[in-house]
Amino acid sequence: MKNLFDPATANEVKARLATLQPDTRRQWGTMTGAQAMAHCAASLEMALGDFNPPRKFIGRVLGPLIKPLAFRDDQPMRKNSPTIDEVVVQDDRDLEVETTRLRSVIDRFTTTGPSACTTHPHAFFGPLTPEQWSILMYKHLDHHLRQFAA
């Protein structure tokens, strides 16, 4: 499966990021491109342990059932998947600022590798290995890049 520890995959994601424009229309959802890129950067920062959101009740119940499905193959994340409040972005953002920030966090995640991943449980899925974080972060970035046809 594709994962963000692989430098070639990280470069592919960054190339796709470069195609985003302020007027790029979303294919689904409500976030603007800038908000989605800020959301993705925050999610990567969570994976790196910069902040640790609490487990959600729904994740404690459904996470163990859905986790094996999320990591079984390269199937993309579904449209309009739920997210945790801690990474929701609702204010106006600048696309150039947010894509620059996101590229920087991608580089940090990729170059620091597995040792930099948090051991704090994911709010929905619970405990993840560094490899699972890397797969999930790739799938999450792919999801939002597809949202903007990038």
Image: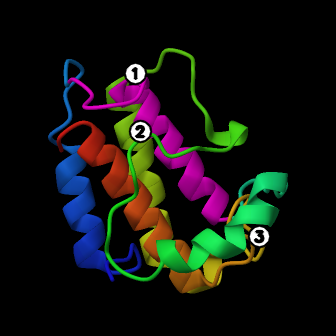
Residue 97, image x, y percentages: 40, 30
Q: Left of 149 or right of it: where is 57?
A: right
**Helix, strand or loop: magenta stretch:** helix
Residue 121 bears which disc, if any?
A: 3
Q: Residue placed at 84% from the left, 54% from the top?
A: 57
Residue type marked 2: Met
Number of residues whose C-alpha sits closer than 10 Å to that of mark 3, classed few (under 14), some (14–19) or many (20 or more): some
Residue 37 bears which disc, if any?
A: 2
Residue 34, image x, y percentages: 39, 28
Residue type marked 1: Asp
Q: Nearer the viewer, mark 1 or mark 3?
A: 3
Label 1–label 3 contact, CB within 8 A: no
Q: Earlier in the sequence, mark 1 or mark 2?
A: 2
Name the quarter where the C terminus is drawn.
top left
Q: Residue placed at 59% from the left, 82% from the top?
A: 130
Real-space Cα distance between discs 1 and 3?
31 Å
Task: Identify the element where label 1 is drawn.
Answer: loop
Report the span colored magenta.
25-48
Q: Nearer the viewer, mark 3 or mark 2?
A: 3
The total of numbered circles placed on residues is: 3
Task: Identify the element where label 2 is drawn.
Answer: helix
